[in-house]
Amino acid sequence: MKYNIKNVIAIAIILISQGITAQFYVGVQTGIGNIQSDVKGTSAGHRLGGAVKAGYIYSLTNHIGIGTGLEFAQYKQDVFLNNPSSTLTTNEVDITGSAFVYTTTTSNYKEKQTLHALQIPLFLQYKTNINKGIDFNFRAGAKYFLPVNYKIEATADYVNGTGYYPDVNLKIDDLPEYGFGVQSNYSASGEYKTKGVIMSSFELGFTFEMGAKNALYAAMFLENGYGSILDQDKNESYIGYNPTSVSNREANGLYSTDKNAEIRPVAFGATLGWNF
């Protein structure tokens, strides 16, 4: 499914033009920020994520409003292979242009992932007074999730890369000057190529009046991405082949091993904001 960011921006501009009569807000949200993956043989450890945001809500009626804004989000997680000693194969081409099967074996491979993204929300809000100075709020809508960068820091006890040339039935496992052999204490950084996706967004909470125009907002939120944020056209070895050395192998990342993988952001937690 394709999403037109121009439509989202156009709606946001229309709302901004009405901002003089809107209620503005700033806030932060924190909780579990998970980058879910369907890449086989991998697991991820959950870590805290968060976002800062600002925007406004334009009232359509006493109970209904429509809101938009801008948010900056951060996701962090550790990803590793289910089997501490794992072997994966990919098709590569050496420095002479000959094709071969590249086999990568690692021990205790792990990558620390950090994803930064801009989010443009568009939501409907329902609110109703439940007590003096206290309103119940429910927000539902969508966000355009645009990754700014998706970086990885990869480490392993060792990396062993071997090559097999099926045309001549030749296996090479110890030729360092051509990139075949063992490297100990592997460490490298890399970055995934990304694209924007749409997220659904829900919030359930309360506002507490703090003055004539000011209020404290507290809520629980749930966000779920649709479609993959990964943007690549071929499968790659999670540790790249270096045709001239067993050192300085690129960290392509575990998610690069499947170009059709669905990598999507999911987050839930608490929001704290100030309306004015």
Image (tube, helix red, strand yellow):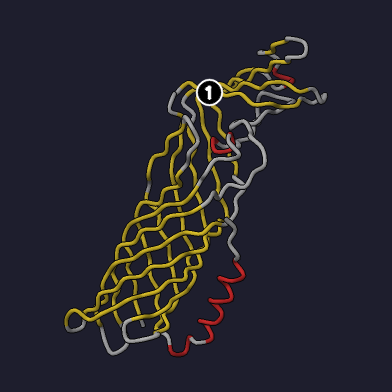
- Determine the residue positioned at 26% across, 87% down: 211
Q: Position of residue 88 (x, y in %)?
A: 57, 24
Residue at the farthest left position: 131
User: Is residue 187 found left or right of 174 in the rendered image?
Assistant: left
Can you give x and y, in whole percent of width and height, for residue 153 in the image?
53, 40
Which structural element holds mark 1?
Answer: strand
128 left or right of 235 in image: left
User: Which residue: 44% across, 73% down?
Assistant: 54
- Tell me: residue 98, above or below residue 209: above
Outermost residue on the right side: it is 96
Q: In which quadrant is the N terminus drawn?
A: bottom right
Left or right of 267? Residue 152 is right
Q: In this view, does 245 lie to the left or right of 111?
A: right
**Residue 209: quarter of image:** bottom left
Q: Name the residue furthest top.
A: 169
Pick the front one: 97 or 136: 136
Q: Where is residue 262 in the image (x, y as percent from the top left)?
A: 52, 44
Type of residue at label 1? Thr
Residue depicted at 67% across the width and 42% down the height: 233
User: In which quadrant is the C terminus drawn?
Assistant: bottom left
Res 164 → quadrant? top right
Return the residue at label 1. Answer: 106
* Viewer-side residue, 240 vs 37: 37
Tally the numbered discs.
1
| Residue 115: percent from left, percent from top | 51, 51
Among the 4 quarters of the image, the one containing residue 275? bottom left
Q: How crowded is mark 1: few (under 14 residues within 10 Å), some or many (20 or more)?
A: many
Above or below residue 137? Residue 251 is above
